């Protein structure tokens, strides 16, 4: 089982996550402190066994935050996709779920992250998963926290969703966050005076955090290839290198937000994901023909 899953004490802190200050505060209140102060949480009638859903556009820090949360409370981090659990032999997928929770229990504290939770609807795993989550409710001192992650919240199985009552929206990077990601990713790299991080942060509006990180790597690679391949004299990374790599990439976020307009109406039942609905007001609904 240990070979099957990514299991580690992650080496990432909240300070490695750019921006997202409000989200970090919520994660501290909902994940980190309940582990550290379980008695106090119980006393105030808060239920630290609730599943927590992290949802939002892809590549904007959900997994990074989950790993950082686990690290902040010194918990083991079990990061699973459903493909890690499914087994072609009957009954084995269900046993794999049991094994995951046993493995989690063998540690003082564990965070189990169910990645792409919209895919966890299969009958081979769903009943056992719910049984395990129900069992957590009766534990006096919670040792396991279950997190779910998705960029397709509209596709989550409804009988699973009710186990994830704490829902945290992880938004796209705003200007300040983009600036911080650029600073982090370009730290120590040879870039010239022509580079304006503020301009780059403006040019990367609508890009996911992961794409901004990749843009920094690609701009650096332009130079690397020149230096190695053509034996040109060293020069520094300039704005034109960034313009070239940015032009090759489409911003992913307008498309993602447009999709949410297809899937959710404002108001009504879709207040399940109220923070997303609030965040998307800066993106317009696509025109209907
Ligand atoms: N807020 C952030 N600060 C710094 N890097 C980030 C941030 N968000 C995403 N990244 C970068 O993008 C990568 C992918 O982010 P991840 O957390 O896996 O996205 P997802 O929301 O899809 O889970 C990270 O490994 C990291 O390099
Ligand atoms: Mg992820």
Image (cartoon, helix red, strand yellow):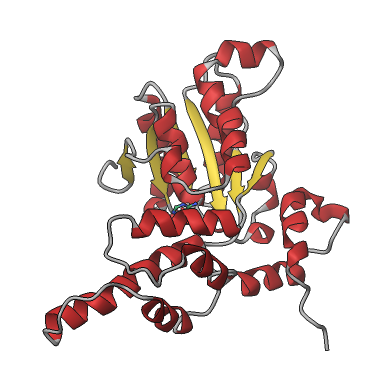
Residue closer to the observer: 80 or 9: 9
**In percent of the image, x 37 and y 58: which residue is there?**
185
Q: From the top left corner, tell me how far across and down residue 285 is, in percent.
A: 78, 74
Q: Quadrant of the C terminus?
A: bottom right
Q: Quadrant of the N terminus?
A: top left
Q: From the top left corner, tell me how far across and down residue 220 is, in percent.
A: 29, 71
Q: From the top left corner, tell me how far across and down residue 218 is, in percent.
A: 33, 73
State left or right for residue 137 relative to residue 5: right
Quarter of the image holding residue 16?
A: top left
Quarter of the image holding residue 49?
A: top right
Quarter of the image holding residue 262?
A: bottom right
State left or right for residue 258 relative to residue 56: right
**In percent of the image, x 40 and y 72: which residue is there?**
194
Identity of the residue furthest to the front in this view: 193
State left or right for residue 218 relative to residue 289: left
Residue 230 shows up from this direction = yes
Q: Is residue 155 above or below residue 67?
A: below
Residue 173 shows up from this direction = no
Quadrant position of ligand 1: bottom left
């Amino acid at each position: 089982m240990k070979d099957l899953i990514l299991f580690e004490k992650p080496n990432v802190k909240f300070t490695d996550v750019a921006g997202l200050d409000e989200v970090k505060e919520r994660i501290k209140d909902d994940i980190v402190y309940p582990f550290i102060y379980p008695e106090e949480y119980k006393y105030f009638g808060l239920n630290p066994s609730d599943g927590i859903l992290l949802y939002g556009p892809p590549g904007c820090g959900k997994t990074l935050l989950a790993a950082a949360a686990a690290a902040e409370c010194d918990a083991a981090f079990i990061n699973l996709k459903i493909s890690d659990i499914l087994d072609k032999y009957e009954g084995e997928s269900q046993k794999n779920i049991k094994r995951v929770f046993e493995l989690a229990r063998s540690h003082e504290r564990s965070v189990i992250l169910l990645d792409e939770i919209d895919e966890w609807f299969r009958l081979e795993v769903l009943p056992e998963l719910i049984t395990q989550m129900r069992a957590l409710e009766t534990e006096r001192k919670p040792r396991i926290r279950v997190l779910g992650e998705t960029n397709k919240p509209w596709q989550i199985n409804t009988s699973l969703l009710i186990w994830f009552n704490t829902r945290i929206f992880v938004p796209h990077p705003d200007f300040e966050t983009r600036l911080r990601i650029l600073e982090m990713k370009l730290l120590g790299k040879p870039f010239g005076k022509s580079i304006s991080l503020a301009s780059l942060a403006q040019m990367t509006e609508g890009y996911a955090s992961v794409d901004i990180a990749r843009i920094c790597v690609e701009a650096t690679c332009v130079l690397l290839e020149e230096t190695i391949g053509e034996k040109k004299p060293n020069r520094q990374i300039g704005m034109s290198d960034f313009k070239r790599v940015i032009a090759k990439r489409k911003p992913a976020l307008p498309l993602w937000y447009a999709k949410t307009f297809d899937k959710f109406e404002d108001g009504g039942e879709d207040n399940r994901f109220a923070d997303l609905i609030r965040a998307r007001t800066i993106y317009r609904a696509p025109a209907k023909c």
